[in-house]
Amino acid sequence: MTMSVSSRVVDATSGAPAVGVAVSLWESAAIEGEAPAEGAWTLLSQGHSQADGTVESWAVRQGIYRLVFAIGAWWAQCGMPTVYPEAVVTFSVTDPGTHCHVTLLVSPYAYTATVTTERPVE
C-alpha cells in the first residue's frame, strides 16, 4: 500500500501561511525502535512551502523520517530576527496505507509541530 507525507507551515505571528520556507525530507537507516544516528540520514527530496503554506506530498515507505524546515533563512527574508536556524521534526511512518501530515507553527522564538495520520476512504 502507498504511504505518503505532506507538510504545511504557518506563521504564528500573523496566522497566515509561511510561503517559501525551504523544506527537506530525510530518511533514516535506523531500525524501528532505535534512535537514528546523526550520520544515518539520506536526503530524499527538497521543496518550498507554496502560497497556502503546504509542501508537496512525498511517497514514503515504513520507516523513520525527518523534515528539516529552514526557518532561519525564511525569517531573515521577512526582516525578523530568530533564534532558530531550522526546525527539525523526526517521526515514524508505521501504518501501511496511511498519509502523514506534518503541520509546523512558527514564530521567531518558538515553533511547534503536529503529526497527524489519515487513512484514505475506501
Image: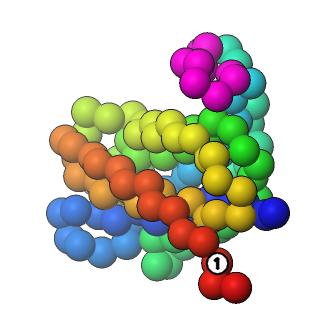
Residue 78 place in picture, x, y as percent:
32, 58
Q: Is residue 97 left or right of residue 68?
A: right
State the residue lying farthest toward the right. Answer: 1
Q: Magenta segment, which residues?
A: 30-38
Residue 50 place in picture, x, y as percent:
54, 72
| Image-quadrant location for residue 15 | bottom left
Q: Viewer-proximal residue, 6 or 22?
A: 6
Residue 65 place in picture, x, y as percent:
62, 39
Residue type highlighted by circle 1: Pro
Q: Quadrant of the C terminus?
A: bottom right
Disc 1 target residue: 120
**Magenta span includes 31:** yes
Query: In the image, what residue occupies the spot 22% across and 62% down?
Result: 12
Q: Is residue 49 above or below residue 76?
A: below
Residue 77 is at least partly visible in this image: no
Query: In the image, what residue occupies the spot 46% across and 37% down?
Result: 88
Residue 39 place in picture, x, y as percent:
67, 14
Within 10 angstroms of label 1, few (less than 14), some, or many (20 or more) residues?
Answer: few
Q: Quadrant of the N terminus?
A: bottom right
- Magenta stretch: helix, strand or loop mostly: loop
Q: Is residue 13 above or below residue 26?
A: below
Q: Is residue 8 left or right of residue 24?
A: left
